[in-house]
Image: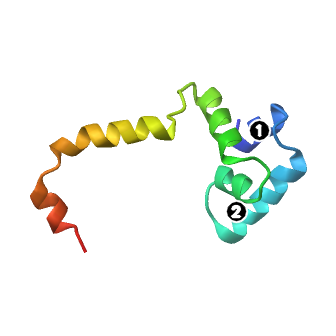
């Protein structure tokens, strides 16, 4: 079952919402979830929580990502940072 169909089945969006997002996807491209969020049908948070349930993976909160980022900075070589600086 396609992602948009699952959203309709779970009652998170209507069939009309799905059709609108699919039409927008044909015109502008992108993923169906991105189009649903950009149209304001679901918030990014609502869509993220849906994906988490659907894919059975936990949501990574922004604060958790920053912790990972800072813990990895000690492994980045100064030469690498300098090479990619503008």
Q: Label 1: which residue?
A: 7
Image quarter for residue 25?
A: bottom right
Nearer to the camera, 64 or 83: 64
Secondary structure at numbered mark 1 = helix
Location of residue 6 in the rendering, given as x and y in whole percent from the top left corner:
75, 35
Total number of numbered labels?
Answer: 2
Answer above or below: position of 40 versus 52. Answer: below
- Does the rendering let one see residue 26? yes
Q: Position of residue 42 (x, y in %)?
A: 76, 47
Residue 82 at what x, y percent from top left? 15, 65
- Please tell me which residue lies in front, 57 or 62: 62
**Callout 2 crowding tier (Cα within 10 Å): few <14, some 14–19, many ≥20:** some
**Nearer-the-camera pick, 72 or 4:** 72
Element marked by disc 2:
helix
* Residue 77 pos. (x, y %): 12, 52
Q: Considering the image in quadrants, where does the C terminus appear?
A: bottom left
> Which residue is pictured at 81% across the width and 31% down the height?
10
For marks 2 and 1 on the same chain, the one whose residue lies earlier in the sequence: 1
Q: Which mark is residue 61?
A: none
Using the image, tell me which numbered label, if any, was put on residue 25. Answer: 2
Residue 27 vs residue 69, the one in the foreground: 69
Q: Is residue 21 left or right of residue 84?
A: right
């Amino acid at each position: 079952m396609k992602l948009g169909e699952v959203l309709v089945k779970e009652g998170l969006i209507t069939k009309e919402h799905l059709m609108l997002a699919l039409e927008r996807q044909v015109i502008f491209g992108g993923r169906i979830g991105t189009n649903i969020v950009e149209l304001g049908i679901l918030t990014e948070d609502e869509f993220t929580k849906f994906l988490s349930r659907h894919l059975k993976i936990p949501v990574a909160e922004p604060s958790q990502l920053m912790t990972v980022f800072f813990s990895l900075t000690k492994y980045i070589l100064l030469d690498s940072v300098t090479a990619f600086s503008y």
